[in-house]
Amino acid sequence: MTEHTLDILYRDDDLLILNKPAGLLTVPGKGPDNQDCLIRRALGPFPNARVVHRLDQGTSGIVMFPLNYITLRTLTKQFETRGVHKRYVAVVSGLMEQDEGEVTLPLICDWPNRPLQKVCFEQGKAAHTRYRVMERDADTQTTRVLLEPVSGRTHQLRVHMLALGHPIVGDRLYAPVDIQEQAPRLLLHAQQIFFDHPITNQPVNIHCPPAF
């Protein structure tokens, strides 16, 4: 893979930020059919790229790759202290009633059905999502919503929207079959990320609109 095959949103000596296409893994999976991924595509032109976070395979949008150890260490700390802020756009089934709100349902792996996650008040880990309605479409009976994960649990946005009764359109893991078939992909996109640059400490705000 050459640099030109990557959708580069930002690049300097310390940091690379890419737009991941839907359907592509962030890191390699198990088995020979799951080796093509964003980090491997990035390593060709950027051999020092390192993984600090990831997106689900079905989710498109912004992914950061530190290009040296200092950047990796600093960004890891920023993620741990919630200094990195991300916003996603999703299209969910149904017309959401509230214009905005928060979901704080705890999540745990649904072990017999992994990799699915589920709400569990007894043993689940704290999870927090803010949401704001962007647009309601009465014709398609869907809502475009802006999602801000305060925490970063696996499948958090997908399970929290499901728990509200509004699964994400195209979600092959959590949505009913008819809602899965309303789109050829998961309609979830990491649209914005903002944080302090790990070397210069200057604010960085990257925006990447969805294709849907």
Image (cartoon, grey):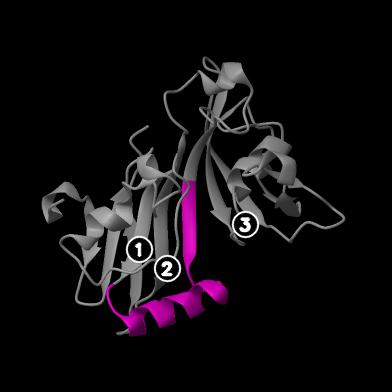
* Residue position marked by numbered label 2 in the rendering: 52
- Dot 1 lies on which element? strand
Task: Tell me if I can see residue 131 in this picture.
Answer: no
Q: Counting other residues with Cα less than 10 Å from the Cα at mark 3, is it few (<14), some (14-19), or many (20 or more)? A: some
Write the start and end of the magenta stretch as one range. Answer: 67-88
Residue shown at the point (19%, 66%) measured from the top left: 46
Apparent side of residue 76 relative to residue 81 in the rendered image (left or right):
left
* Residue position marked by numbered label 3 in the rendering: 153
* Location of residue 122 (image quadrant): bottom right
Q: Name the disc covering residue 211, or none.
A: none
Q: Counting other residues with Cα less than 10 Å from the Cα at mark 1, is it few (<14), some (14-19), or many (20 or more)? A: many
Marks 2 and 1 in Cβ contact (< 8 Å): yes
* Location of residue 195 (image quadrant): bottom left
Q: Is residue 72 on the magenta stretch?
A: yes
Nearer-N-terminus badge (3/2) = 2
- Dot 2 lies on which element? loop
Q: Amino acid at mark 3?
A: Arg
Disc 2 from disc 1: Cα separation: 7 Å
Of labels 2 and 1, the one closer to you: 2
* Residue position marked by numbered label 1 in the rendering: 64
- Dot 3 lies on which element? loop
Disc 3 from disc 1: Cα separation: 18 Å
Apparent side of residue 75 relative to residue 174 in the rendered image (left or right):
left
Nearer-N-terminus badge (3/1) = 1
Quadrant where the C terminus sits is top left
Q: Amino acid at mark 2?
A: Val
